[in-house]
Structures are given as structure tokens and as C-alpha cells.
Amino acid sequence: MAGAGTSMLGSVLVFTVILSLQEIYRGKLASSELYTILGGFTSSLLFLFSLTFIGNFQESSGIKSGWGAVILAEIIALIAASTVHRVCITTCFLFSAGVLYEVNKISGYMLSKTESKSKRH
């Protein structure tokens, strides 16, 4: 598994690429309803990678992560979505809620898997 530093670097790089592409194709993403939904989805990916960065930064700093990281990552994603179209803000929020649910589910699965390994030894 990747360390916190490697994961931080990777998430910042992917965040930068997605944000740059979103701003380059801002006009195209705002041109139709389907592209507006796609703009909200790409902004929710920004949420995912900013949450990854913030969580790993807090972990490497020894700070306990919590809802503050989620709220900050959501604000960042919603600001990025607002540069494309107003509807992107709503779709970004909805997609981000789905992403957060899935990340929480995967996190719980990995935590239970790690705990079961530690009980065996």
C-alpha cells in the first residue's frame, strides 16, 4: 500500500490535472444538460482527491481527521463547480455524497480486514 506522502503527491497531481481540464473545457461543460451533469461529476472527483490529500496531510501531521476534512474538501469542490455552471454545484454535491458513502464503506471494510488480521497474530 502507498504511504501517506506518495498518496498526497498523487492526489495533488490528479486534482491539478482534473481542475485544469475542467477549466479548459468550461464552455463545453456548460453547453448542454448532459455536459453540465458531467461537470458536476468531474467536480466530485475533485472532492475525492482533495479529501484524499487533506486526510493524508492530517495523518502525516498527527492531527485527527474528521468531518472538518470532508467539509473543506466539499467547499473546494463546490467552488470549482461554480466556475463551470450553477447546476454543476448541485450535481457535484449529489455525486460527492455518493462518493463519500462509497469511501466510507470501503474504509469500514479495510478497517475490519485489518482488525481481523491483527486478532490472528
Image (cartoon, rainbow, N blue to C red):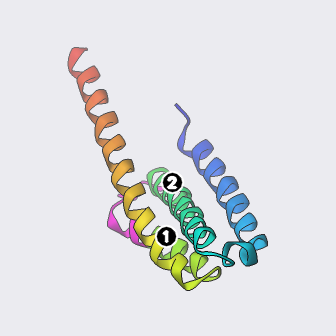
Residue 61 makes an appearance in the image: yes
Q: Are marks 1 and 2 in contact (CB under 8 Å)?
A: no
x and y percentages locating residue 42 in the rendered image: 59, 63
Of the pair 96 and 111, the residue shown nearer to us: 96
Where residue 32 sits in the image (x, y, percent)?
64, 75
Marks 1/2: CA distance? 17 Å
Residue placed at 59% from the left, 51% from the top? 8
- Give the residue type that dot 1 points to: Cys
Assess disc 1: are there few (<14), some (14-19) or many (≥20) residues with their C-alpha within 10 Å of its C-alpha: many
Identified by mark 2, the residue type is Thr
Q: Circle 1 — which element? A: helix
Q: Check the picture and name the quadrant holding the C terminus.
A: top left
In the rendered image, residue 55, in percent from the top left (x then y), is placed at 46, 56
Identify the residue shown where x is 55% and y is 56%: 49
Name the residue located 37 percent from the left edge and 69 percent from the top edge. 68
Left or right: residue 20 versus residue 80 is right
User: Would you say 46 lies left or right of 99 here?
Assistant: right
Which segment did they paint magenta? Answer: 61-71
Q: Residue at x 51, y 54 (%)?
A: 52
Residue 69 is at least partly visible in this image: no
Residue hosting label 1? 92
Between 69 and 79, the residue placed more toward the observer is 79
Task: Find disc 2 in the rendering and name its residue.
Answer: 52
